[in-house]
Each structure stands twice: as C-alpha cells, then as structure tokens.
Amino acid sequence: MKPGFYLVATPIGNLRDITFRALDVLSSVDLIICEDTRVTGKLLNAYGFKKKMQVYNDHSTDKQREHLIKCVKDGQSVAVLSDAGTPLVSDPGYKLVRGAVEEGLYITSIPGPNAALPALQLSGLPTDQFSFLGFLPPKTTARQTALKKWEATPGSLIIYETGPRLLDSLQDMRKILGNREAAVMRELTKMYEEVQR
C-alpha cells in the first residue's frame, strides 16, 4: 500500500455500513490511529483484523503528530479513524492533515458514513441549501454568540449536540434563530433510531 494517510470513514452505529474500500484499506495499512483503541478494536474484531493501533485525539501533542508524519515519510501507510463517522468532521485530525499537506505527503479520503447527511435526509427540512455547524460551544453565552453568526443564513443548519446539553441548546436556538422548523435525531442507523420533528 502506498505510504500516506488514509482518512477512513467508519460506521456511526450499524457496523454493516462500512464500505468495501474501507475494509480493504484497514486490512492493508501498517498502522491505524484512532480516538479510542477500544472503540476501533470492536470494529476491527468484527471483521477479523488484527492491526497495530495508536491513540490520536484532541489531546495529542505536536511530538505525536511529528512522529506520525515521520512514519509516513519512512514508508508506512497510516489509516486515520474517528470513533464513528468521517474523520476530521467534528473530530480530531486537522493539525495532522495540515502537517501532512505542508510536507507534501500522500493523503486520501475513503468516504462513507457520517451523521450530518443522514440527519438532513431524515429531517424533512430543505436539502438544497444547508450549513454544517458541528458542535456548538458548551457555555450559554458562547453558544448564543455562535448562533448569532448563523441567524440570517438561509437553508437548513446541521448542528451536533450531546444529550446532556440538548435542551439548553434547543432553547438557545429558539431564542437566537427564532421559530424555525427543527428536527432532532439520535441513534442514527441503529435499531432504536429516533427522529423528532
């Protein structure tokens, strides 16, 4: 396999949502970096792969990034995975990819599952124009400030939120964005998938 970074999308809930190409890459790379080796280990075990894994997350240091870039420079192929979905989309990895770009290293995306587009599809809201905001700040004032930047934006807004902050965020959205149509999803692609419109 060509030395480089392979950004591999992984299932967001249903393990059968992985692509054939992702499986090919995972079976062939020299190293897999991931947010949590326990989570990625379950995925690899489901498909019978035994691979060397390293943690790479928001707490990873510049030294760790430099080491991974050196691995690729030395001829290794490295898969970059998030716990669920598409790497770098509301997940760690930007600084690593930026460093690889600056070094002129090979980087490719193995597209697949993500939560944003299925949520948009299931929402019943307009799909011709949308913006992805990712996670909002956890504190009320910062969250409201962030939302104000989007209040005049046409189209649907896709926002990720944690369960414990959901109600507060919905109240802030109503306060800042007004009485807009909304949909809330959880457990997408899983047996207990739920959509509230």
Image (cartoon, grey):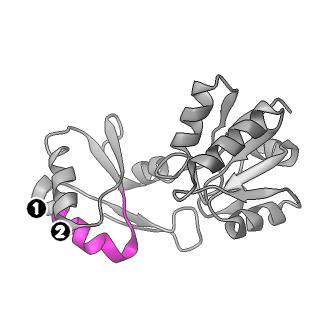
For numbered disc 2, what is the local secondary structure?
Answer: helix
Magenta stretch mostly in which secondary structure?
A: helix
Q: Residue at x 53, y 51 (%)?
A: 92
Name the residue at the front extreme. Answer: 63
- Span highlighted in magenta in the image: 160-172
* Vertical placement of residue 158 versus 195, above or below: above
Q: Residue 70 in the image: x percent, y percent?
A: 74, 37
Q: Say which quadrant the C terminus sits in.
A: bottom left
Which residue, given by chain and number where applicable, does mark 2 sit on? 171
CB within 8 Å, label 1 to label 2 = yes
Q: Residue at x 10, y 62 (%)?
A: 175
Mark number displayed over residue 175: 1
Does residue 178 appear anywhere in the picture? Answer: no
Looking at the picture, which amino acid does disc 2 mark? Gln
Q: Residue at x 19, y 39 (%)?
A: 153
How far apart in space, not on screen, are marks 1 and 2 (Cα)? 6 Å
Q: Residue 58 in the image: x percent, y percent?
A: 51, 56
For numbered disc 1, what is the local secondary structure?
Answer: helix
Mark number displayed over residue 187: none
